[in-house]
Amino acid sequence: GAVVSQHPSRVICKSGTSVKIECRSLDFQATTMFWYRQFPKKSLMLMATSNEGSKATYEQGVEKDKFLINHASLTLSTLTVTSAHPEDSSFYICSARQPLAGSLYEQYFGPGTRLTVT
Amino acid sequence: TQLLEQSPQFLSIQEGENLTVYCNSSSVFSSLQWYRQEPGEGPVLLVTVVTGGEVKKLKRLTFQFGDARKDSSLHITAAQPGDTGLYLCAVTFTNAGKSTFGDGTTLTVKP
C-alpha cells in the first residue's frame, strides 16, 4: 500500500504559540489530502480537505483562520494550529487520496501527531 | 442521524474465538473501506470493497459487501491478541471526494 508520513509524531507547545504539522505522501502524488482530528476512544472527525494548488475546504465548525492548511506540492500538505490553546490538544491525522479505479479512491493515513498544549 | 452505524461498539473476547462486526447504512455506496487502528497510530487500510455481494479474504479476516451496497461485515476467525484495535468502516460517495467514517468497533482479544 501507499505510504504517508507525518512529522512530528509528538509535539508539546505552550498556549498562544503556533505549531506546524507536515503530511507527506512518500511514494505517490496526492492532489487531495485530508486532515482529521481524533479524540480518545472516538472515531475520526474530518477537519478539512486539502487540495494541491488551491484553498482548502473546511468542514462546518472548523475555524479556517485557526487551522491553516497549505498544500503547495503534490506530496506535501501542512496544518498549522495557530494560537494554540489547551482545548486544541488532540491526535491529528492526515490522509492522502490515491485513485483506485474509475472515480473511486482509497485513503492512506499517516501515523498521526499527538499535540499537547500546556 | 449517524450515516454509518457500526456494531457492536465494544467487543471483548478470548483468544481463539470468532467474531463479526457490522457496518450498516440506509444509503448506497460506491465503495467501502475497512481500517484497523492501534492506539497512538494512524488507521491502516485493510480492504476496499466495491461490488455488491463481494467477499474478500485477508488471512483470518473475511469482508463482505452487501448485495445492495448499503452494508458490510468483517468476520475474524480464531482471533488473536494482535487483532486488538479499533476497526473502522468508511464510505465514499461518488463525486463527493471525501470519506465518512463510522464510530468504530473497539476489539479486545484477551490471551
Image (cartoon, rainbow, N blue to C red):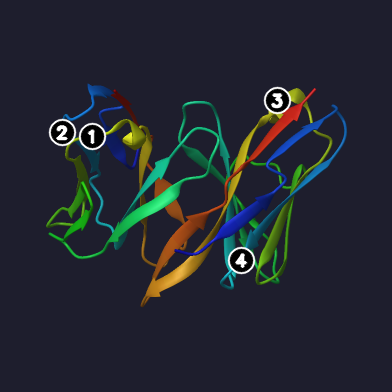
Residue A112 sits above or below residue B91 on the image? above
Q: Could you confirm whether marks 2 and 1 are on the same chain?
A: yes
What element does badge 2 sit on? loop
Residue A45 in sight:
yes
Look at mark 3 in the image and give the residue it sits on.
Answer: A87
Residue B1 in sight:
no
Q: Quadrant of the C terminus of chain A?
A: top right
Q: Nearer the viewer, mark 3 or mark 1?
A: 1
Q: Between residues B83 and B47, which one lies in front from this camera angle? A: B83
Look at mark 1 in the image and give the residue it sits on.
Answer: B79
Cα gap from disc 4 to disc 1, whole angstroms: 33 Å
Q: Residues within 10 Å of mark 2 (few under 14, many from 20)?
A: some
What mark, if any, has residue A26 been given in the picture?
4
Q: Could you confirm whether marks 3 and 1 are on the same chain?
A: no
Q: Amino acid at mark 4?
A: Leu
What element does badge 1 sit on? loop
Mark 2 belongs to chain: B
Q: Could you confirm whether marks 4 and 1 are on the same chain?
A: no
Q: Nearer the viewer, mark 4 or mark 1?
A: 1
Residue A46 sits above or below residue A77 on the image? above
Q: Nearer the viewer, mark 3 or mark 2?
A: 2
Q: Amino acid at mark 3?
A: Glu
Q: Amino acid at mark 1?
A: Ala
Q: Are marks 4 and 2 in contact (CB under 8 Å)?
A: no
**Residue A64 point in image, percent of width and height:** 72, 47
Q: Nearer the viewer, mark 4 or mark 3?
A: 4
